[in-house]
Amino acid sequence: MTRKRITRHPVLDVGPQEEVTFSWNNKTLYGKPGEMISSALFANNIQIFGHHPRDNAPQGMFCANGQCSQCLVIADGVPVKSCMTPLKEGMVVESVEGVPRVPRVDAPPDKGFDVLEKEVPVLIIGAGPAGLSAALELGKAGVETLLIDDKDEAGGKLVLQTHKFFGSVEDSHAGTRGFAIGNLLDEELKAFDCVETWLDTTAVGVFSDKIVGVVKNGSYITIKPEKLLVATCAREKMLPFPGNTLPGVYGAGAFQTLVNRDLVKASERVLIVGGGNVGIIAGYHAIQAGIEVAAVVEGLAEVGGYKVHADKLERLGVPIHTSHTVVSANGTHRVESVTVAELDSNWKPVPGTEKTFVVDTLLIAVGLSEVNEFYLKAKQWGMDVYCAGDAEEIAEASAAMFSGRIQGLKIAKSLGRFDGEIPKSLEEKAEVLKSRPGKPVKREAPEGETGVMPVFHCFQEIPCNPCTSVCEEELIHTEQDTITGLPYAVDVEKCKGCMNCVAVCPGLAVTLVDYRKDPEFPTVTLPYELGREGVEKGSVVTLTDVDGNTVHPSPSRGNHTVKRVVANKKRFPGTLMVQVVVEKEKAKQVIGIRIQKEETAMGTDPDPAGLADDAVICRCERVTLGEIRSAIRDGVRDINQLKGINRAGMGSCGSKTCRPMLWKIFRDEGIALEEVTDRVDRPLFVEVPLGVLAGVKGENGDE
């Protein structure tokens, strides 16, 4: 369709692309029917969606999840969030220049209109891993349940995940890719007639009469549940730095939405800030989509995510800079480069250590905040409300599944539809899956240089053991027989080289070394998830060890070349087993194939420390760090007063992005947080067009 579409992917199915025409500022473009307007614009290499009325700053996309209002456009005359509005044939889309105009209504209603009211025993807000798992338990108990979600498919963040999940095969589909798990849960749910699912349905508020207001197909509907479960996932945090609102700066989740859900090649070269699982995984997804990753930058002294995730990136040639942070995003109309610097012990950039990377995209992956406002408000109004998944506590999706199951059983029990006790094992497993990874340890390679044997390149205790489930000879165990124990093999002389352990490992941390044909030059089987290009039989490859160091071939042997490529598409889709002959003294070191060139960065820029006050905190109203600091130093201790002084938090998103940063600024200014008054929540947590509340509809049911 366009040069920004992903036409080939090693994991995702890229089928025929149906096209529709739409216009952007009077220019005819092509997109996919039903895709979000923002994705269609990105696919046409358009990342500036308008300009802000305050300072004419270019506006683009940030969250791609309906949580902010950065991506506002005018579609068929109506201001909409482009990341939440599906594209239609012939749609007229325009950029927002200045203040959006109010659409004209020729025939407003002269009297009230009927609002659909619905009563249900259980309402679940959010059809992600927690919501789906809770609905499954309620379905098994025969409880009438309504499950709603604001997206056009169920699965939540699972839809965006192309990597294989950790945990256990039995309990959390370990070794299966995230999007496939979402499909599995959704299919299981269809077996229960008592569970109804409404997609494209946005919960907008919870009210004192114990009503939940939702918008579905342009109509306002009130739902009165006997029990309410909030499973609304999380929103991404932001950092204050100059240039942080330039088009090209957006959350890692938004990036995954573009490349994995919508198959849009959103960038050519990215830099990632945040070394937790979200940031590291986003980097891996970028490489799968054919996008170069310049570096990952992490403020802590070590990555916070799983080491096996970080190892995957380093083996591919991605440098990870710990004790570093972003100093500025640079560019006039969009990101052209990003400057980073080392941090001192006080978390301050060290002058003279600045380094600038030429990139077109900066991904922010510095943590998540719970989307729990629906839960807190329902609790305030005395509703019988429960909370699950990230809305309860930020954790991995596998933990969210257990959280949802537990809350589903609790609700069924409270309704008298579940007689037994909730298994303690569910709570125990949920806590294990939420646990922080252990400290990396040193492990010696297994002894012996005969037969065929697995070599485990995982050096950190994390909740993961699918390799123990797929070994045909039952040779693989974990230390202490726990899910977090490091794996090892027994009776390796019985290993038949089935390669299942290599193929299933979510961390790509298992290799198979086969000495049977040539003990001096054994064959090493490596996991690989980036497609066949570059690893076909006879291809010359650069092999790396677990730390990303090159494993050089011996001069007498020549380059390392691919001997064979094996695939088990039915059982382990998307994973290739690449076989390479390696000298015996190096065979147990080899784990990866480098595909990226060595890091390239420009020299230091002038010290930009003095520009910190230019960082935008409130994206909607363009309120800067300097303006907020000034107010705080003048004695402001009330976020509502801040709003009155400089409009911080007054924007259409309801301070969803700036609120966490406001609290941090107070703390950084030495103010005790108990002295600060929080802002008053709005009645509606999500923007609603007035036409919806007034009952105004267009010919096609649109407001």
Image (cartoon, grey):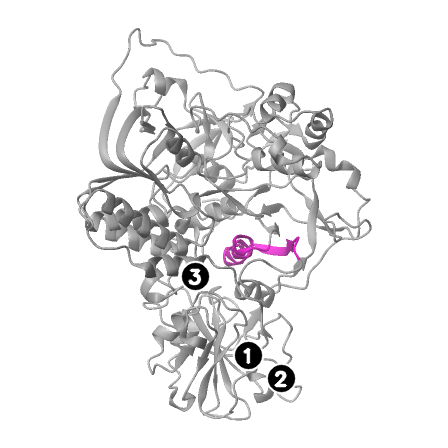
Q: Which residue is mark 3?
A: 432
Query: Distance between the Cα atoms at labels 2 and 1?
Result: 9 Å
Task: Let me know if residue 12 appears in the view.
Answer: no
Q: Report which quarter residue 168 is drawn in.
A: bottom left
Q: Kindly indicate whether the residue at mark 1 contacts the one at mark 3 (C-beta within 8 angstroms).
A: no
Q: Which residue is mark 2?
A: 558
Q: Which residue is mark 1?
A: 561
Considering the image in quadrants, where does the N terminus appear? top left
Q: Earlier in the sequence, mark 2 or mark 3?
A: 3
The image position of residue 242, as x and y in percent, is: 70, 38
The amino acid sitting under disc 3 is Val
Residues shaded magenta: 275-300
The image position of residue 403, as x and y in percent, is: 36, 51
Which is more toward the observer, 18 or 599?
A: 599
Q: Earlier in the sequence, mark 3 or mark 1?
A: 3
Q: Secondary structure at mark 3?
A: helix
